[in-house]
Image (cartoon, rainbow, N blue to C red):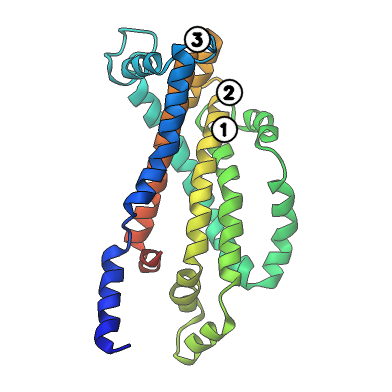
Amino acid sequence: MTDLSKDALLVNEKKNKGKRPLGSLVLGVLLPLLLLALWEGISRFNLVPAYLLPSPEQVLITAKSYIFDQPGSGPYSGRFWGDLSASLVRVVSGFSLAALCAIPLGLCSGRIERINALLSGLVNGLRAVPGICWLPLAMIWFGIGLKTTVFLVALAAFFPIYQNTLTGSALVAPVYLQAGAMLGVSPLGRVFSIIVPMAMPNIIVGLRLGMGIAWAYLVLGELTGVPDGLGAVIMDARMLGQTDLIVVGIFLIALIGKLCDSLLVLLLRTLFKSARRL
């Protein structure tokens, strides 16, 4: 292959990078549309009572009231933005705390055997404990509110971030570190110029998994009786028998969780050159 052909291939690869084929986009919406059609058919022919599965139309009406109506015009009208801000504060605080602890520990555990031996037993043991088991203890320690939810979110997000960072750090071949040492790179410089860039694919996977788990544990923390938040709305709707509002809360959490995942990837690609290659 000539140099001109290689250059042309590289240009085409850069142009197509980040673009999804039309077929992939169609497949991405095909299953949700089929499920929506099935849901509409079940509701239209009354195969399931409305109090168990409200119709898509009723869910849309409830979502419109919850998101766009003026506060005070209904029990939950216009509450969305306040609930969203409360939930985002809890998720971002807990997720950030988890990342700040898990990434340095994961990098150290992946490269230093003694630290890995020191932490592995404790981490693997705690990772097996279900999150619901921590809820009573967290409420005793922190009470009902922000601290309990942040603790649960941070604890849940810590393990996937730590484990993936450890794996990525351990996979860095010693030859690269030796080459860096021969070029005069300091030990700390090798961490940021060699280990972190090469472990970045695993770190990103861990962060994305941690973000998804953070939203799951947010709902657990908000089911304790906090006055605001998306999980609190779902809990209140269950107590009042408003299945349509429960469905709205589920859809909103899924949508916001997907948006947070996309923003996280965008932020990492903006801040780190090594993330832009993924």
How far apart marks 2 and 3 lie (CA) works out to: 35 Å
Q: Which residue lies at the image location 55% right of the left edge and 42% below the top edge?
A: 213
Look at the picture and state if 228 lies above or below 256: above
Residue 89, visible in the rendered structure: no
- Disc 2 secondary structure class: loop
Q: Nearer the viewer, mark 2 or mark 3?
A: 3
Q: Which residue lies at the image location 36% right of the left edge and 44% below the top edge?
A: 26
Look at the picture and state if 69 lies above or below 223: above
Give the mark nearest the N terminus, 2 or 3: 3
Relative placement, left or right, of 61 versus 44 is left
State the image quarter where residue 33 is shown: top left
In percent of width and height, residue 201 lies at 48, 63
Q: Nearer the viewer, residue 80 or 92?
A: 80
How far apart marks 3 and 1 lie (CA) works out to: 42 Å
- Disc 1 secondary structure class: helix
Look at the picture and state if 196 lies above or below 246: below
Residue position for label 1:
148
- Name the mark on residue 44: none
Residue position for label 3:
46
Residue position for label 2:
224
How far apart marks 1 and 2 lie (CA) works out to: 9 Å
